[in-house]
Image: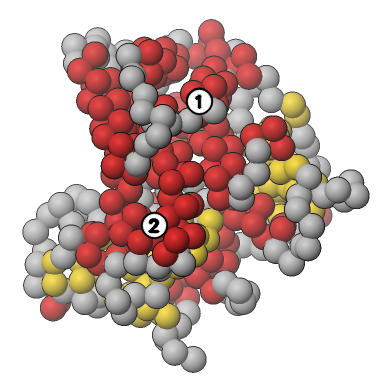
Amino acid sequence: MDRKRIVILGSTGSVGRQTLDVVRAFPGAFEVVGLCAGNNLDLLKRQVDEFRPRYINSAAELNGHNGAQKLAAEEIASLPEVEMVVCATVGCAGMGPVLAAIDAGKTLALANKEVIVMAGEVLMRRAKDSGATLLPVDSEPSALWQCIEGEQTPPAKFIITASGGAFRGRTWESLHNVTPEEALKHPTWTMGAKITIDSATLMNKAFEVIETRWLFDIPYEQIDVVIHRQSIIHSMVEFADGSVKAQLGPPDMRHPIQYALFYPERQQNADLPKFDPVKTGSLTFESMDTSLYPCFDLALNYAKRGGTWPAALAGADEAAVSLFLDGRIRFTDIPEVVASTLAAHTPIMEHSVEDAIQAAAWATERTYASHSAGAPI
């Protein structure tokens, strides 16, 4: 079997490291052509030593390390020899290399929610024009994708599950003085800091609804969210005859990563945890009380407006989460901070990807500037 030539964007982050875990489990199946990372120089060095990529991109200077040539992330993502680009980054900065991969007609395994939130409609149109293929890696969209594979009729409803995050069951008012350390203790998943905070506010779930709308070309009205505390059922699809298909598995990102890497085949991997229905026991579902998660309705209300509103939403949320993690605003300030920035946004309705990038950058800068003197918690 020929080795699949891949590039990993965000190789030192949570999803990037887990992608390399899957690659490591299948010696000879993949050639890592390029690794792109941020400031985690020590880990990137170790990854370069192990996987010997020809190209790297990092905020730190590593040009020439073990023969790896430094190129811009956009160049690496669009190299002619690359077959698949895994976007394991978090945040709006992932847009540049994602767009480069799409315009180059690559197969893109996408774990970054923000780029679809920012410009989902435009990206899907450009992917259609270039012949690029987008494979969802985020666990819930991956579950939806797996449920509709092989079906000949369109789904009637998508049902996305949510764990409820670190503070599920608590009132919004009771969270006034929670610390970043408390918010980062997700009850079922182990993830990066930004996505974990977004899970606590349920902004993350709103982003997944937006992702689902564009990745699967389905109206918002046909997407539901339910609370499922065990994080075993990752999403469900209802069909016209009332049948419902669900994708189940332990809360481990390596499952959707491996599915995308080997698609359309499935491979046995002894390193992955397996679902045991007896040990798991009961699976429960609850309706979502949006009064406990004000970010959810806030995000969807602005996303449905279209234009550059969702891009500004993504940029404002990125900054608000960072401000909270730095102790400059309270957890319960996050929706107010995001709303304040959005209230000042002047949207462009007939927009390009470049407009979306600028709107997100404006929102991020505006949010930081508005809270530059924020008092610590």
Please give the label number shown on residue 87.
Answer: 2
**Position in image of residue 364 (x %, y %):** 27, 28
Classify 21 as above or below 351.
Answer: below
Work out whether mark 1 precedes mark 2 in sequence or the reverse, and give the earlier one: 2
Classify 337 as above or below 101.
Answer: above
Classify 186 as above or below 79.
Answer: above
Q: Secondary structure at mark 1?
A: loop
Q: Is residue 189 left or right of residue 67?
A: right
Q: Quadrant of residue 176?
A: top left
Task: Please state which of residues 300 and 193 is positioned toward the viewer in this rendering.
Answer: 300
Evaluate whether residue 45 shows in this view: no
Q: Secondary structure at mark 2?
A: strand
Task: Please state which of residues 372 and 209 is positioned toward the viewer in this rendering.
Answer: 209
The quarter in which the C terminus is drawn is top left
The residue beneath circle 1 is: 305
**Position in image of residue 272 (x %, y %):** 58, 66
- Total numbered badges shown on the rendered structure: 2
Q: Is residue 49 left or right of residue 360?
A: left
Q: Amino acid at mark 2?
A: Cys
Query: Residue at position x 45%, y 83% from top?
Result: 29
**Position in image of residue 135 (x %, y %):** 52, 61
Q: Quadrant of residue 77?
A: bottom left
